[in-house]
Image (spheres, rainbow, N blue to C red):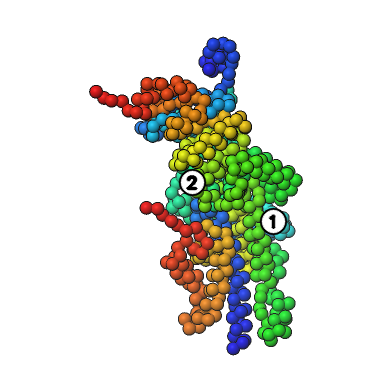
C-alpha cells in the first residue's frame, strides 16, 4: 500500500513538471491576450518555428535548401559550421523580434478596431502560414535539439528516496531544469512589467487603449514588444519541448493542450496560466494512474479537455480570470 | 491673429504680438453625412482657462478630440505654438505636451493610483529599453526623479491616502481626481479637461474647481475645459467659446457671453410665435 502511495507521489511530481511545460505555452497566449485582446492561435506554431530555427542555426543548415536546390540545381544543405547554443539562441531571438515586427506591420496594423473574431481568424491564418514557412525553410524531418541541458534520471533524487523509502523516484533532469527556467522566466516577466517604464506602458495598454494613447503610448510599438516577448516565451517553450521529444511538427499541437490550461486559469491571468498548467499536468497524470486502468487507459488525451469543460460550466472566467459582469 | 500674407503673428491693433498657444482655424469635422463641427475658429492663449460650452451634441467633445488627435478634421488647420500641425496620432500629441482627461474616465482600472499617475510620466522618461530592463544607471535615477514629481502631484491633489489602492475600487469623484493627476504628471503645456465635474455633487464640484484654479495658478498650465454647469464655467474661466449644432455662436469673457442673445436662445430655447 505504501509503495502504491509512493508511486502516486512520483506520478504527481512528474505531472507537475509536465504541467510546467503546458504553463510555458499558455503564458505566451496570456501575454498577447491581455495586451491586445487577441487570442493568438499561432502561439504553438511560434514555439515550433523558434525551435526549428534554433536547430537550423546550430547545425548550420541552409535555410530554404530544398527551394534553392530545386531552382538553382545546386546541392547545398549545410554551411558546414556548428554554432554554439548561446549564440544560436541570441540569433533566434533576433528572428523572433523581426517576426513580431512583421506580424504587426503586415497584419495587425491593418486590422485595428476589428472584431476579436477577425483578429482570431487572422492568427489562424498566421499559424498555417508559419507552419508551412517553417517547413519550407528548415525541412519537415524530426530534428534532435541538444542545447546542452542535462537529461536523464536524476541520480541524487533516485538514491536519496531509495535510501529513505526503499523506492527510488524517477525524475528527469530536464524536467527539473525546465521548472527552474520557467520559474526564472515568470519572475523576470513580473519584475519587468512591475518596475520598468515599458512594463508600465504594457500594463496600461492591456487595461485601456484610449487612456494609453492619451498619455503618449504608441500602441504599435507596444504590440511589437508584446509579440516579441511572446516570441521569447515561445522560444523557451520550443527549446524545452524540443529537447524533450525532438523538434517535430506535432510540437505545434501542444498549443491545443494550452487551451484547457487557459480555460482553467483564465485568459487574462499570468498566475492563472502557471497554476492552470500545473493542475492539468498533475491532474491528468494522477487520473491516468488512478482511473486509467478501469477506463481502458489513454485518459491523458481527454482529461484536460473534460476538466476545462467542467470549468466552463461552473466558472467560465477560470480560476483567476476577471469576472465577466454585464450590466443590463 | 496669424497674418495670411506674411505668415506671422501681429496684433490687430499693432501694439503687441501675442502668439496664442493653440489656434484652430476653420475646422470642419464630418462623420459620414453628419457634420459635427462646422467651420470653427478660436484660439487658446497661454496661461488662460478657456471653457467650451454648449448644449448636448453641440460638438464640444469632438472639438477636444480634434485638439488631442483622436479625430482628424476634413478641413481647417490646427496651429500649436505658432506652427501649423500636421495630422497627428493621439500619442504624438501627448508627447508634444498636451494632456487630457475623458468624459467617461479612461483610467487603468487594474493598476494602483500611484501606477496610474506614473504612466503620466512616460513621455518624460527617456532611458532606453535595455537600460530599463537591466535597471542600470540612468533608468534608476530617472525612476526616482519621476517618482518624486508624481508624489508632489499626489500631495497637491490630496490623494495620498489612496496611493496604493487599485483605481477600479475608487468612487467616481476620486477617479476623476486621479485622472486629473495623471494628466498633470506629464507637466503639460496645455491641459484638456472633458467635463471634469460631470456627475459630481456640489461639494465635489467645489473641490474640483479649486484644483483647476490651483493648477492654473501654481503651475501656470493653460487649460481648456468643457463643462455643463454654467455657474462653474462663469466662475472659473477667463474666456468662453459657446457652441451649438457644431457652430460657434459666441466667444468672449464670461460677461460678454452671458449677455449674448444667440447664447441665451441656444440655452433657453426660442419661442416660435
| Local crowd size for mark 2, using a 10 Å CA cut-off: few (<14), some (14–19), many (≥20) | some
Q: Dot 1 corresponds to which residue? A: A88
Residue A128 in the image: x percent, y percent? Answer: 50, 56
The residue lying at 52 percent from left, 15 percent from top is B4
Q: Decide which of B100, A269 is in the foreground and name it.
A: B100
The residue lying at 51 percent from left, 30 percent from top is B236
Element type where label 1 sits in the image: helix
Q: Indicate whether B179 appears above or below B5.
A: below
Residue A108 in the image: x percent, y percent? Answer: 51, 46
Q: Is residue A317 visible?
A: yes
Element type where label 2 sits in the image: helix
Residue A277 in the image: x percent, y percent? Answer: 56, 66
| Local crowd size for mark 1, using a 10 Å CA cut-off: few (<14), some (14–19), many (≥20) | many
**CA distance for labels 1 and 2:** 53 Å
- What mark, if any, has residue B172 been given in the picture? 2
Residue A153 sits in quarter: bottom right
Q: Decide which of B83, B111 is in the foreground and name it.
A: B111
Q: Decide which of B95, A4 is in the foreground and name it.
A: B95
Q: Indicate whether A245 appears above or below A57.
A: below
Q: Residue furthest right?
A: B137
- What mark, if any, has residue B153 been given in the picture? none
Q: Is residue A211 left or right of residue A195?
A: left
Q: Decide which of A95, B32 is in the foreground and name it.
A: B32
Same chain for the residues at labels 1 and 2, yes or no? no
What chain letter is assigned to the residue under label 2? B
Amino acid at each position: 500500500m505504501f509503495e502504491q502511495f509512493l508511486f502516486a507521489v512520483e506520478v504527481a511530481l512528474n505531472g507537475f513538471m509536465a504541467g510546467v511545460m503546458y504553463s510555458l505555452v499558455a503564458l505566451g497566449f496570456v501575454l498577447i491576450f491581455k495586451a491586445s485582446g487577441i487570442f493568438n492561435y499561432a502561439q504553438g506554431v511560434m514555439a515550433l518555428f523558434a525551435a526549428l530555427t534554433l536547430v537550423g542555426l546550430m547545425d548550420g543548415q541552409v535555410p530554404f535548401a530544398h527551394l534553392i536546390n530545386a531552382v538553382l540545381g545546386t546541392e547545398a544543405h549545410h554551411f558546414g559550421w556548428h554554432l554554439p547554443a548561446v549564440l544560436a539562441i541570441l540569433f533566434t531571438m533576433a528572428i523572433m523580434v523581426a517576426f513580431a515586427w512583421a506580424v504587426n506591420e503586415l497584419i495587425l496594423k491593418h486590422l485595428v478596431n476589428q472584431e476579436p473574431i477577425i483578429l482570431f481568424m487572422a492568427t489562424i491564418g498566421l499559424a498555417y502560414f508559419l507552419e508551412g514557412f517553417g517547413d519550407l525553410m528548415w525541412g519537415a524531418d524530426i530534428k534532435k535539439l541538444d542545447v546542452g541541458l542535462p537529461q536523464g534520471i536524476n541520480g541524487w533524487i533516485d538514491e536519496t528516496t531509495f535510501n529513505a523509502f526503499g523506492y527510488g523516484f524517477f525524475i528527469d533532469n530536464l524536467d527539473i531544469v525546465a521548472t527552474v527556467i520557467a520559474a526564472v522566466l515568470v519572475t523576470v516577466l513580473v519584475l519587468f512589467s512591475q518596475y520598468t517604464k515599458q512594463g508600465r506602458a504594457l500594463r496600461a495598454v492591456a487595461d485601456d487603449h484610449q487612456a494609453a494613447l492619451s498619455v503618449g503610448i504608441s500602441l504599435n510599438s507596444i504590440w511589437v514588444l508584446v509579440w516579441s516577448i511572446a516570441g521569447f516565451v515561445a522560444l523557451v517553450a520550443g527549446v524545452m519541448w524540443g529537447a524533450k521529444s525532438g523538434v517535430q511538427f506535432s510540437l505545434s499541437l501542444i498549443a491545443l493542450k494550452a487551451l484547457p490550461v487557459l480555460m482553467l486559469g483564465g485568459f487574462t491571468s499570468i498566475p492563472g496560466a502557471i497554476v492552470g498548467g500545473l493542475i492539468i499536468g498533475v491532474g491528468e497524470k494522477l487520473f491516468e494512474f488512478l482511473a486509467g486502468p478501469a477506463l481502458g487507459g489513454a485518459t491523458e488525451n481527454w482529461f484536460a479537455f473534460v476538466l476545462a469543460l467542467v470549468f466552463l460550466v461552473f466558472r467560465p472566467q477560470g480560476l483567476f480570470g476577471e469576472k465577466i459582469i454585464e450590466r443590463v | 491673429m496669424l497674418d495670411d500674407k506674411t505668415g506671422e503673428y501681429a496684433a490687430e491693433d499693432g501694439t503687441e504680438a501675442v502668439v496664442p498657444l493653440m489656434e484652430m482655424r476653420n475646422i470642419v469635422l464630418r462623420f459620414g453625412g453628419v457634420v459635427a463641427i462646422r467651420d470653427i475658429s478660436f484660439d487658446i492663449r497661454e496661461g488662460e482657462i478657456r471653457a467650451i460650452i454648449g448644449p448636448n451634441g453641440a460638438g464640444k467633445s469632438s472639438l477636444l478630440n480634434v485638439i488631442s488627435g483622436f479625430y482628424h478634421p476634413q478641413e481647417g488647420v490646427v496651429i500649436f505654438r505658432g506652427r501649423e500641425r500636421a495630422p497627428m496620432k493621439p500619442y504624438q500629441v501627448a508627447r508634444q505636451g498636451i494632456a487630457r482627461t475623458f468624459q467617461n474616465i479612461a483610467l487603468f482600472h487594474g493598476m494602483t493610483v500611484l501606477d496610474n499617475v506614473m504612466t503620466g510620466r512616460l513621455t518624460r522618461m527617456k532611458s532606453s529599453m535595455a537600460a530599463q530592463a537591466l535597471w542600470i544607471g540612468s533608468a534608476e535615477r530617472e525612476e526616482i526623479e519621476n517618482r518624486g514629481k508624481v508624489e508632489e502631484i499626489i500631495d497637491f491633489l490630496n490623494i495620498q491616502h489612496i496611493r496604493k489602492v487599485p483605481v477600479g475600487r475608487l468612487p467616481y469623484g476620486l477617479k476623476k481626481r486621479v485622472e486629473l493627476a495623471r494628466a498633470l504628471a506629464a507637466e503639460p503645456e496645455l491641459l484638456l479637461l472633458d467635463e471634469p465635474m460631470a456627475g459630481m455633487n456640489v461639494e465635489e464640484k467645489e473641490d474640483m474647481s479649486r484644483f483647476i484654479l490651483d493648477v492654473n495658478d501654481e503651475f501656470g498650465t493653460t487649460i481648456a475645459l468643457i463643462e455643463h454647469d454654467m455657474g462653474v464655467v462663469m466662475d472659473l474661466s477667463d474666456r468662453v467659446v459657446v457652441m451649438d449644432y457644431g457652430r460657434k455662436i459666441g466667444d468672449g469673457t464670461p460677461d460678454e457671453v452671458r449677455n449674448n442673445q444667440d447664447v441665451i436662445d441656444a440655452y433657453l430655447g426660442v419661442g416660435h410665435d
